[in-house]
Amino acid sequence: MRLKNLIVLTVLIYNGLSAYSQTRLNGKVISATDKQPISNVSISLQGKDIGTVTNEEGRFTLVARLTPADSLAIDYLGYKSQKIGLNNIRLSQELVIQLDTLIRQLKEVAVKPLTLRQLLDSITIHNQKAFLTPMKLNGYYREFVFTNNKCTEYADALTTYFRSTNKLSDDGQLKIIASRCAEAKEDNKDKSAAKEFYLDSKVPPNRLFEYAMLYGMIDKYFPVEDLKYYNYTMESVQNSTDLVVIVSPKPAAADKIHRVTFHLTDDFTLQSYRLEIDPTRMQNLPSRSLLGIHVKVLKRYAEVNYERSGNKIYPRFFKFDVMVHIGGKFSGTTLDQTYNPRSEYVTTDISTTNLTPFARSEVYKKGNLCNNGVAINDALLKEHNFITPSTKDSLAISSMR
């Protein structure tokens, strides 16, 4: 739900703040154009590799050791970045953060344009070299499952992800530090109705990061044999050397549905990307049928934002959101439901020196997320950055506890 009133960013910083105190910084971000809150905005402390993102209502919480010399960096695809110094902010003050939309101009290419394959290969190769190696990303992971618009499962975890090389064949390691789950109680008096489908928090260890490392997304949604059905446009960002590349299906390619928008530096290094079903194809999406069961995709969305650490990058935040409708009859059971799993991850801080792999016994295997790590609780979350739930999500979580 989006708020229509002006939203202010209230920053809580006390006078005499020491460099060793943990402070919770809360706020909101809105669009300067329509005053609407902006979700998934990257909020980070400049030069400290600490950050979080805004939720659906534009809210965020940042836990960090702050000094008056620190600055907030605010970034989001399609909006001008901002930096805000904390030196003049006091507890009683309110600071309005309004992000301006980027005005883009079509890039005039004087040289021979790249083919789409050359373009995607160039982006992949540049970013294969640009990712930090090795790295450990401390982060917060959260997932929801909504069935017929009702939250049927919730899970979250504090995690550490280790990646030793930037080779595409290299698998990373995921370690669960703390976790918890909640599942809606089944109230099914009609025995002929279908049992709800549950995700059970069975997260494949590297699936979380294969899209964030880019190659997994391109391999899956833009395979080489399909590139002839797609076009791309390249635009430059006004008053910047950054580029925006949009890959979308050709009008005649009716069965190709995906569109991806890359925000790149002028050397093709990723700032962010957004994958979605092309809006012009939504009405014509076919359903797949098997043994009387029909499945139709209603939404497929992925967004990844990247942060620089020196001359390298790492994924700061990513979000995946899928919705399908399942209908039909099977073995006397009638199915008619929407199934909407959503997952989010935010990197809270990174390590890049003196790194070693986790012991085999500590690495998360494919299984239930909540059987790993200690039990997460609100007190533990207060010591870590996490994705602030929206009002709707908070109500959904509370109803399951």
Image (cartoon, helix red, strand yellow):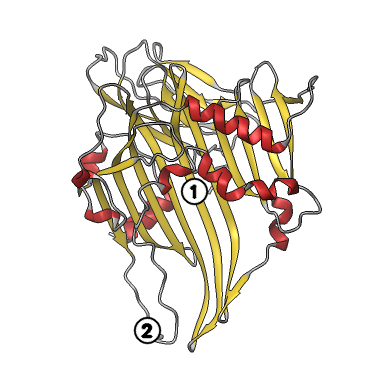
- Give the class, few, some or many, for how many residues have Cα within 10 Å of label 2's Cα (few <14, many ≥20): few
Say which quadrant the C terminus sits in: bottom left
The residue located at (41%, 26%) in the rendering is 132
Q: Secondary structure at mark 1?
A: strand
Residue of label 1: 320
The residue located at (46%, 53%) in the rendering is 342
Q: Is residue 259 visible?
A: yes
- 211 vs 299, left or right, is left
- 76 vs 351, left or right, is right
The three-letter amino acid code for the residue at tag 2 is Lys
* Badge nearest the viewer, 2 or 1: 1
Tell me which numbered mark, 2 or 1, is placed earlier along the sequence.
Answer: 2
Q: Position of residue 144 (x, y in %)?
A: 41, 55
The residue located at (34%, 58%) in the rendering is 202
Q: In the rendering, which numbered label is found on residue 189?
A: 2
What residue occupies the far bottom of the structure in this picture? 332
Q: Position of residue 338 (x, y in %)?
A: 52, 67
The reply to whether dot 2 and dot 1 touch (C-beta < 8 Å) is no
- 205 vs 100, left or right, is left
Q: In the rendering, which numbered label is found on residue 41?
A: none
The three-letter amino acid code for the residue at tag 1 is Phe
333 shown above or below 362: below
Q: Is residue 8 visible?
A: no
Q: Position of residue 227 (x, y in %)?
A: 70, 45
The residue located at (57%, 36%) in the rendering is 273
Q: Secondary structure at mark 2?
A: loop
Q: Which quadrant would residue 125 be assigned to in this image? A: top right
Q: Say which of 390 and 287 sits in front.
A: 287
Q: CA distance from mark 2 to mark 1?
A: 33 Å
Q: Position of residue 26 (x, y in %)?
A: 38, 31
